[in-house]
Amino acid sequence: MKGKVTWQSPSNIALVKYWGKTDPQIPKNASISFTLANCHTTTTLNYIPKKEASDSFDFKVFLEGKEKQEFAPKIEEYFKRIELYLPFIKHFIFEIHTNNSFPHSSGIASSASGMSALSLCLMSIQKIINSNISKSDFFEKASFLARLGSGSAARSIEGPLVVWGEHPSIFGSSNLYGIKYPGLVHEVFTTFNDTILLVDKGVKQVSSTLGHKLMLGHPFAQARFDQAQDNMSRIIPILEKGDLDAFIDLVEKEALSLHAMMMTSDPYFVLMKPNTLKIIEKIWAFRKTSGCHICFTLDAGANVHVLFPNKDKELASKFIEEELVGFCEKNQYIRDNVGAGAIII
Ligand code: PMV
C-alpha cells in the first residue's frame, strides 16, 4: 500500500495561554484559542511500505521543496513519542513535504500548524488501515498526536474556538487533546479578526521547550496556573454574552501575565521589543478615544496579534495601516481571522 495524503492545518492564537507542562506534554492549566484561517501549513505525506522490516524510522522532510535535515531530530522525537499509538510508522518510508502560507522566519511559530498537519496525514493512513474510525475519534486522536509534537498543536485541528486542558466547567475538556469549545458562543466571536504585526521576524529568543521548563520551580508558577484556570471560568459568560469589554480585559491580562512569567523566571527574558510596547500604547490610546473594540495579545515573542470584531473592521484596519504598520519590520503584517479548522486536500 503506497500513496500520498495532504492536509492543510491552521495556526491558532491563544486567548487564555498555556505555559508550563509536565511529561508527556500535559498542560499545567487549560487554554483556549481562536483557530486562524489564513496562517496555515500544508503538508503532503508520501508513504511507501518498507521492503524489509527495520527498527528505525525512515523519513525525509522538505520545506518549500528543499530538504531540511535540521528538522529531522524533531520529527524523529515526535515519531518516538507516537509510535505506541501508530505502530505502523516503522513499516513505511515517508517523505514529508511541507509549506507554510506565512513567510518563512516571520517569527510566527509553524509548530502548531505543522505538527497538526502531519498528525492528520498520519491519521489518514491509520484510517486506510482501520476504516471503522469515526470522524470524531479521528479528530480526537489527531489532536492527541499533535499534542505530542507540540502542545499548542492540539488546538490546531478544529475551529473556531478550541479548548485544551482539563477544566471543571468545560464538559469533555481533556489534558490529552483539544476539543471544539462546547459552550454557547455569541456570533461576534465567530468572525473575529487577528492582524499579526511582525515586529521581529527573527528566530525566537526563547524556545517554548525552554520556556515551559522555566515554569517548573518558578516562584509564581502556581499563582499563574490558578489565574489561567480562573480566566477559563471567566471567559465562559464572556463568550456567551459577547461581552467585548470583559473580553479585552481578560485577553490583554493573559498576554501580559505570560510575558511577566518570562520576565521573572531564572534566567529571565524580556521578549517584547520597544516597538511591541509602542504598539500596545497606541492601541490603548486609540481604544480610549475611538471606542473601537480593539485589543492585543502576544505569543512568546515580540509580534503583536491585534484582535477586533468584524463590526469594527473598517475603523480598526484604517488605524492599523496608518498608525501601527510603521512599527513592523519592513512594514510587514498578516491579516487573518477566525477559521473553521483543518481540511484535507
Ligand atoms: O506549543 P508550544 O509548546 O510551542 O507552546 C506555546 C505556548 C504559547 O504559544 C506561548 C501559548 C499558547 O497557549 O499557545
Image: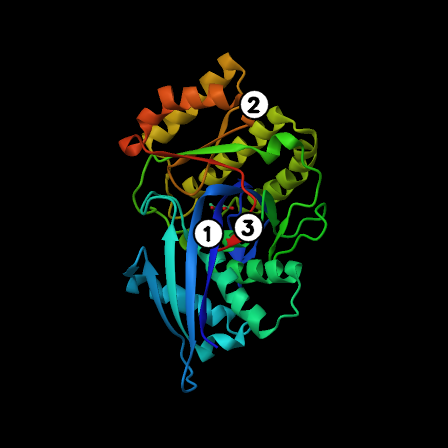
Q: Residue furthest top?
A: 289
Closer mark to the observer between disc 1 and disc 2: 2
Residue at point 54%, 74% (across, down): 84
Say whether disc 1 or disc 2 marks the residue closer to the N-terminus.
Answer: 1
Q: Earlier in the sequence, mark 3 or mark 2?
A: 3
- Residue 259's tag is none
- For the image, the number of numbered tags is 3
- Residue at horizontal 48 percent and vertical 77 percent from the top: 1
Residue type for callout 3 = Arg
Q: Would residue 170 be found to the left or right of residue 245 on screen?
A: right
Mark 2 = which residue? 311
Q: Residues within 10 Å of mark 2 (few under 14, many from 20)?
A: few
Whether 160 is drawn above or below 178: the answer is above
Q: Is residue 197 above or below residue 109?
A: above
What's the distance in space between the residues labelled 3 and 2, CA to CA?
26 Å
Q: Which residue is mark 3?
A: 155
Residues 291 and 38: in front is: 38
Is residue 139 shown left or right of residue 1?
A: right
**Residue on which the image places disc 1:** 113
Q: Amino acid at mark 1?
A: Ser
Label 3 near ligand 1 (CB < 8 Å): yes
